[in-house]
Every structure is written in structure tokens, then in C-alpha cells.
Amino acid sequence: MTPAFVDAHHYSETVLGHIAEPHNVGAIERPDAVGRGTNPSCGDEVTLYLRFEGERVAEAKMEILGCGAITASMSALTDMAGGKTAEELMAITPEQIAEHLGGLPRHKRHCAQLAQRVLRDALKDRA
Amino acid sequence: MKRVYLDHNATTPVRPEVAEAMRPFLGALFGNPNSIHGFGREARAAVEEARARAAALIGAAEPEEILFTSGGTESDNLALRGALAAAGGSGHILTSAVEHHAVLDTCKALESGKIRVTCLPPDKAGRVTAGAVAGALRPDTRLVSVMWGNNEVGTLQPVGEIAALCRERGVPFHTDAVQALGKVPMNVRELGVDFLSASAHKINGPKGAGFLYVRTGARLAPLLTGGGQERDLRSGTENVPGIVGLGEACRLAREEGPAQARALAALRERLESAVCERIPDVVVNGGAAERLPGTSNLSFIGAEGETLLIRLDLEGIAVSTGSACSAGSTEPSHVLVAMGLSLEALRGSLRFSLGWGSTEEDVGRVLDVLPEAVRRVRAMAPKPEARR
């Protein structure tokens, strides 16, 4: 299995793909939950929108102003969130986000962590 | 897809003339220049020819004032550590906050109870004035080190004025000229520079070769001891192929540098004016200063440098960025921070550096791709009302 965080300077092809064409970009008009996050050290700004149908996520979208790793992390997170319950979303870890991307450089760990924080912020918003 | 390389401040392509000049020294001419026999003499002749070419490019009085090293970083280390050691291993170093890490981190490593360092802040364009240097000199200042041209924004420092001031005060002056070499006229003898660092791979030569100019009479202690090569100041068998490549690159830079600098300045001007015309909210970092001809550091407000870099890369265009979102502690470009850029401008900075081989067509490709890349990255950003 690919390790979540790798000693690499460069991004994997999967990460590059997400940066070139991030998934689920934009806002949801009537979201059930909105999470926001910034990374003060580098200035990344992220917004996550979730729409639920019953107990499960029907739509996840995001807006992003940040580096390649946070763009890819959010893109991956919106893919991973689909169909999950709030409880399942709470269980998503930065490692799983990085694994979904085929590994992130170790010095970008904080980007996957920011994605998780934004997700939890959204779930708090819904609660 | 034709690739466009606009990252010449990182490294440059080896010119075919340089590779050709090096080739025999990777083959039949393998001798050790320190050997007495014919093989050694051939190699020695080539090394000394390269030394003369390097000396000619910077206006050194004597070829012997050139010491071959492994590159800019070693040259900077040798100048700083060697000059301080020769001065007794204690005292004050005066430098600027926009130096390359090879200077800044060496100063940091030297800083101790016996050695103190002052880093002069630049103005908004990245300039350090001779007046500021004069104001910060101390009776125990043993070395002033201010770079000639900045690698990130291209700002040229008033090295002539600073050198004159240092001469007047009797303080040795070092300049890291790695980026400026071959791009601006240089005459170390007239300016009164004591030490000057240079690197081959920034002037279309090979990696792993460079030199330190040491003015006759300037005091320097070696870092490397051993066989006593390079006037006992840099032991180790000379990197003959690298030195020959460096020499050829210096020859080409001397012959073609002035015309190339004019052409690059014109290309840079075209790039900047067209980018500013086609893309809103662009800041030209260092634009108020005199700059290296091929360097353009632009901030795209509301966008992020690394994602722009990757989008350009996917279109085959290579540039670099001063925005480095890395593990918490790592700052973005220390140069842009020292220049006082806003967080927005820091985040959205890209460096385009042109060089030998750059064409109108290359600039045209950037103009075809960049506006859409910036538009897309900006469009993904959280809307102001959604931001906290």
C-alpha cells in the first residue's frame, strides 16, 4: 500500500491530475453545512459545502485559494465525502486523504490536516 | 508539445559550444593538471586558459586572482568563512536580508560569541543603499557581503558605491555575482571588489564548477586543505572538464553578453507589459529598481503561485514561485518577505527568468496560456462573502 506521506519533493501524477482539474469546484446554493479554514502560515483559504439527503452526503463542493497540495487534498476530500454519513465523515483522517492521492510529500502533511479541519468545521456547522 | 524554459535563474542549458569544449577532457585529455608529464601539461594549459577567460570576463587584473571552486555556494562559503578566519575568526559581518541562502545561512552558521552579523533590510524594490551600509559599519566589521543581482526579483545592488565605501573604510567587500555574471558589465579592478562569487551553470556552463575572485592582497584562509592546489586556497584536483566548460561559457558571455542582455531586457519588457495589459491585479516585484535583464517576478493577486506554476508546467512552460507553502515553519521567499510584500502578493508570486535561447515565441506561449491559468485559479477561490 502507498504510504500516506512520502519523502518526496515532487507531487505524484495523481496529485498533479487533481491540481490540473480539481473535482467539485464551486459553491452549493443551499448547503446543509459549510466549513471554512485558513492556514495562517501560507495563507491557504478553503471553503467546503455539503448537501445531505437523509443521513448521507449527496453533494460535496469546495472553493480553494492555496497551493497544489491543499487543492488536491480538498479535491480528494469532496470525492471521498460522497455517500457518507456524518459519523463516517468524522472518521476521515489526513492519512486517508493523502492515501487517496497516492501519497503526499511529507512537508505537505499540514494540507491534508487542513482539509480534515475544514470537514470537521462543516460538520460542527450542521450539528 | 514544445517546452518553454523560463527558469534560467535556477539553471541554464549548457551551450553546445561549451559541451564541445569539455568533450576532449572527458576522453583523451584526462590528465591531472598537477602532473609534470605531458598528460598533466595538456590539462594544466586548459585550466589556465579557462582562468584567463574568467579573469577577462570580470576585469580581474591577473588570472591568478581566479580560484576555481565547485560553484556559487562553495565560493560564498570560502569568501565568508575564509575572510573571517583570515581576520582572526572574530568580528562583525555586514550583509543584506536579500542575499542567497549560501550567504545568509553561512552567516548564521558563523554567528557566535565571537562573530556578529548584521542583515540590512532592503527597500520595497529590494535595494540596499551604500548609505545604509555606511550607517551599519562597525569598527570591528571584517567583511561586507552584498550580492550584485538578486536571484528572485533581479534587483541590482549599487555594488560600485558599496565597494568604494568599503575601500575607503578599509573593510573587505564580497559580492555574490552568481546571477549578474555575464548579464551586466563587470570590472572588479575598477570597482575595487575584494571577493566575487560566480557559478558556471548560471551562464550556460556545466554544474559543479564556479570560481571565487580574490583580489591580490585580499586576505583569505582556505576551507579545504590537502594538495595545495589553487594557490593553497582550495586543495583538491581540479575539475578539469567543468573548468574548461566554465572558461568557454565565460568567453561566450564576454563576447555575446552585452547584446544578449539588451535582447533579454526587451523580451522581459514585452512579457511584463503584455501580462499587465491582459491580466488585472498584477504587481511587478522589484519593478522600481534597476534589474537583471531577464528576470521578472510578478504577483498575481488572488491567485496562488504553486498552482499557477503547475498549470503552466502542464502546458510545458517552466517557471518558479516565491510562494512556498511548506510545513508550518517554512517561510515563503525571504527576499519577498524582506521587501515587505503583502500576504496576497507573496502567495501569488511567480518568477519568469529568461536567458540564452529565450525567444519572442516563448513569451508568446506564456501570453497564450497564463491569462486563462490565472483566471481559472482565481475563479476557484472562496468568494469574499464566504471568507472569514
Image: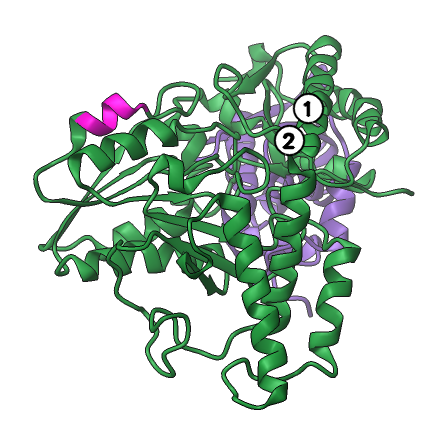
Chain colours: A purple, B green
**Residue B294 numbered tag:** 2
| Figure check: B25 above or below B364 | below
In percent of the image, x 49 and y 79: which residue is there? B237
Could you tell me which residue is drawn at 44 percent across and 48 percent down? B60
Residue beneath the point at 89% across and 42% down: B2
Magenta stretch contains residue B211: no
Residue bearing mark 1: B268
The quarter in which the N terminus of chain B is drawn is top right
Secondary element under disc 1, as helix, strand or loop, is helix
Please name the amino acid that badge 2 sits on.
Gly
CB under 8 Å between callouts 1 and 2?
Answer: yes
Q: Position of residue A82 (x, y in %)?
A: 74, 40
Residue B227 in sight: yes
How many callouts does the rendering have? 2
Residue A121, position as x, y percentages in the image: 51, 32
| Nearer the observer, B17 or B272 | B17
